[in-house]
Image: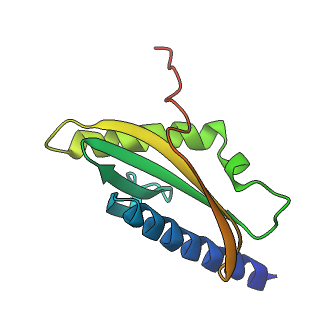
Amino acid sequence: MDKPRNQAYEWGEQAEELAADYLRAKGYTVRERRWRYGASKKEIDIIAQQDDTMIFVEVKARTDSDTDPLEAVDSRKMRFLCFAADAYLNEQEHDYFYRFDIIGISGTPADYSLRHIEDAFLPPLMAR
């Protein structure tokens, strides 16, 4: 039972590397990989920069072509990314514009398709 989980984990790591390579090829600077927010085990997959914009990237990988990896980014994940991005930006010496991107990768390491959605979502409104 552990083997499929390990293979899925390995594919996820490979997909993150493919996404980082893709971003570098597009002229982005990859500043962080697997950046952890606080004591949480949750992480931001990739933090990249393009000019004066910080880009927080969620990478989703699937081997099943019938499943859209982009649909796996739910409202809970979006909220986490927003809180973590805020914490990251507060650590910076300069102010940056920011956005949230999603990269979905379907297939296998040998044969995959990559889909990049820039500015995929806005931070949710919060009531105080």
Viewer-side residue, 122 vs 127 = 122
Viewer-side residue, 113 vs 81 = 113
Residue 103: x percent and y percent?
57, 55
Residue 107: x percent and y percent?
73, 71
Which residue of the protein is positioned furthest toward the left in this rendering? 93
The correct choice, above or below, for 71 with respect to 112 in the image is: above
Which residue of the protein is positioned furthest toward the front in this rendering? 26
Q: Quadrant of the N terminus?
A: bottom right
Residue 7: x percent and y percent?
70, 81
Q: Quadrant of residue 61?
A: bottom right
Residue at 50 percent across and 56 percent down: it is 42
Residue at 55 percent across and 34 percent down: it is 121
Q: How is the image coloured?
A: rainbow
Would residue 49 appear left or right of 112 to someone viewing this image? left
Residue at 50 percent across and 38 percent down: it is 119
Residue 15: x percent and y percent?
58, 70
Residue at 22 percent across and 45 percent down: it is 91
